Image (cartoon, grey):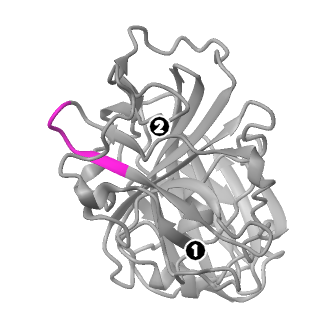
Amino acid sequence: MLAPICLRTVLLTVAPALLAAGCGDDGDADGDGTTSVASGFAEQDGGPATSNADGPTTAADDDTGTPFVGDMRGLATFVYSAETSNGLPARVGLAGGYRLEDPGFAGIDDLYSPISYQLAFPPLPAVDTVLFEGPVPVFDWGDEDQWLQAGNGMKLRQGEGGPEVLACLAQYFPTMEVPSGYPMYVTNATQAAECSAVADAFVPAAAYDVILYGGELFVDNVLPERVTTPPALEVTAPDFATYDAPLSSGSDLAFAWNASDDATTRIQIRLIDADGNLLSAHAADDGSFTIPASELGALSPGPLDILIARERDDDVQFTNGGLTVTSRWERWGFFQLD
């Protein structure tokens, strides 16, 4: 399993592609949490080809909010991460995977953070709640047979010819117990060029097609306009633009941002101290939230990494089950807590 985190080192050295260099594991064959890539895209000019003779299928109906039909469950996290105060440029990534309906992804709502930052964030608390979580949890990969390998890619595309992000199949995080790793779909510059993503590929408040390559498990699906990204997040407090800006544990910590007119969005706030302790907050997307000084007192003084993100979920029915896509516009800030 992943170590809890590499703290600020991971956040400050994450590559422009989705995957950061890992903290290290004896089973890590390539140094970045992946083994040999199974995508096959290097030999293809047009992205992944269908392995089904009948070709892709286009679903006729939009998601209705009803329970998924089929025994597969998919989870994907589509992220725009803004430029940071130490000059790390804006970057975009997509991470996804499939499991059977049982166990599905109960207790897991983010596959991007465990892969790119080695941070296994627990689900958010109730809205308008602040919760001290203690040490950042270790991501539980579960048993090897809980994960399903479909085709060689998972894609989000803003209409034909529009910006797109392709997550390619990779056997991720090999261990002594699971030497082959787990089948994941990731944007990663160490794979073929088609599998890397540029920052412009994430367009705020835009509709995206979902394209799922099913391999031996299901016919390829082309599902128009099933995902909508959240509006861009503009943070005005605290001072995310200044590296190591001081914060006082004796004062309330006020957040301010541009409120969203999308009623489906939410604000996620995570604070990680020098000892790897996590403070989580779930705010309504109304433009402001305050963490009381009494809650900050649970954190250790010193370097403090703060994530604030606007996100929304879309449930997508495909031929063999359901896929939940979380789109997130996030910003990291690096502070000093006295």
List the residue tagged with mark 2: 215
Marked residue nearer the N-terminal end (2 or 1): 1
List the residue tagged with mark 1: 33
> Mark 2: few, some, or many residues within 10 Å (few <14, many ≥20)?
some
Residue 242 in which image quadrant = bottom left
* Residue 91 position within the rendered picture, expressed as x and y whole percent measured from the top left: 34, 65
Q: Say whether residue 96 is left or right of residue 177.
A: left
User: Label 1 is placed on what type of residue?
Assistant: Gly
Residue 100 in which image quadrant = top right
Q: Say which of 130 and 191 sits in front.
A: 191
Q: Which residues are magenta?
A: 160-166
Residue sitting at the far front? 53
Q: What residue lies at 40% left-to-right and 48% top-to-bottom?
A: 258
Q: Say which of 112 and 278 sits in front.
A: 112
Q: Say whether residue 55 is left or right of residue 274.
A: left
Question: CB under 8 Å between callouts 2 and 1?
Answer: no
> Mark 1: few, some, or many residues within 10 Å (few <14, many ≥20)?
many
